[in-house]
Image (spheres, grey):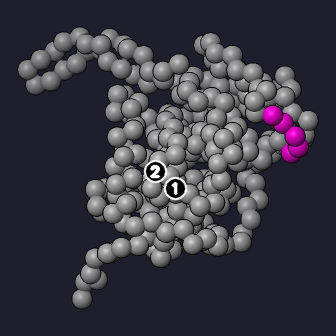
Amino acid sequence: MKGFRHKKITKISESLNHVVEDAVAEERRLRVLINGKEALKMYCSPVMIRELVTGFLMTEGIINGGWCAERMSIQYGDEIVVDVPAEGEVSLEGGAITSGCVGGMTFDRPVDEEKLDTAVTVGREELTRLFQQFQKRSDLYNLTGCIHSAALTDGRHIIVSAEDIGRHNAVDKVVGYCVLESIPLGDKIMLVSGRLSSEMASKCARWGIPVVVSRAAPTALAIDIAEARGITMVGFMRGRRLNIYTHPERITGEQGRQPG
């Protein structure tokens, strides 16, 4: 599925009023079953579903035990139904609707409080180049104007990118892809389009991702989590401008002069 469809709309400007075909983002309800029993529902863009479910289940620790992402069944229709065969216990305690995302959900799971110990760095100019490349890849956003994006980079190349109506979903798709492809996350940089909330910071903390960068702003709680876990948090990444909120030592290169 392509994640959008065309609808007739009435477009009005100062001197024109006409009907045109416009691209609008698809939104589908996703039902996740575990061993045939419904576990949760969410809304998402109908692309990279296997990656989304894998990333979500792994990040939130919902299944405690063995399960195989390759064996999950996916049925597409008016809603998307995924059935995950699993041997472990299922825990849905602590589920909460996330801030601002359509049908988004996160779970209050313990996070290792040890600070990330990694020598990962990225040059300011390289980060600017990578973020510009990331934004150019946001095809669904450029087409519809209502999609969030996420991507993972090793500081030189973008490894994977994903889009979704939910910013948390986009991150889970990126994580799920890396899990399925056995790509380590502890030396990578997460790029995202939306605001950096506490849930976004916690997702990166759970996977030991040392740098997270967004064109939007972080919340105070997200900054607290990043500071405590040793994550470099960058916001307002626009052109060559950026704000570094925590652990600036990972962003190398000329940072400009301090006002004096």
Identify which residue is drawn at 81% across, 34% down.
Answer: 68
Outermost residue on the left side: it is: 15
Q: Is residue 245 left or right of residue 19?
A: right
In the picture provided, is 71 more to the left or to the right than 66? left
- Which quarter of the picture shows residue 143? top left
Q: Which mark is residue 250?
A: none
177 in relation to 129, above or below: above
Q: Which residue is mark 2?
A: 157
**SS label for mark 1:** loop
Image point 76% across, 26% down: which residue? 72
* Residue tagged 1: 154
Magenta-colored span: 64-68
Give the residue displayed 30% in from the left and 13% down from the top: 21
Report helix, strand or loop for mark 2: loop
Mark 1 in CB contact with mark 2 (< 8 angstroms):
yes
Residue 238 screen position, x and y as percent: 31, 55
Local crowd size for mark 1, using a 10 Å CA cut-off: few (<14), some (14–19), many (≥20):
some
**Could you say which is closer to the camera, residue 18 or residue 61?**
61
Mark 2 Cα shell of 10 Å, populated few (<14), some (14-19), many (≥20): few
Image coordinates for residue 151, horizontal then vertical, percent: 50, 46
- Principal SS element in the magenta part? loop
Residue 131, image x and y in percent? 38, 52
Q: Is residue 136 magenta?
A: no
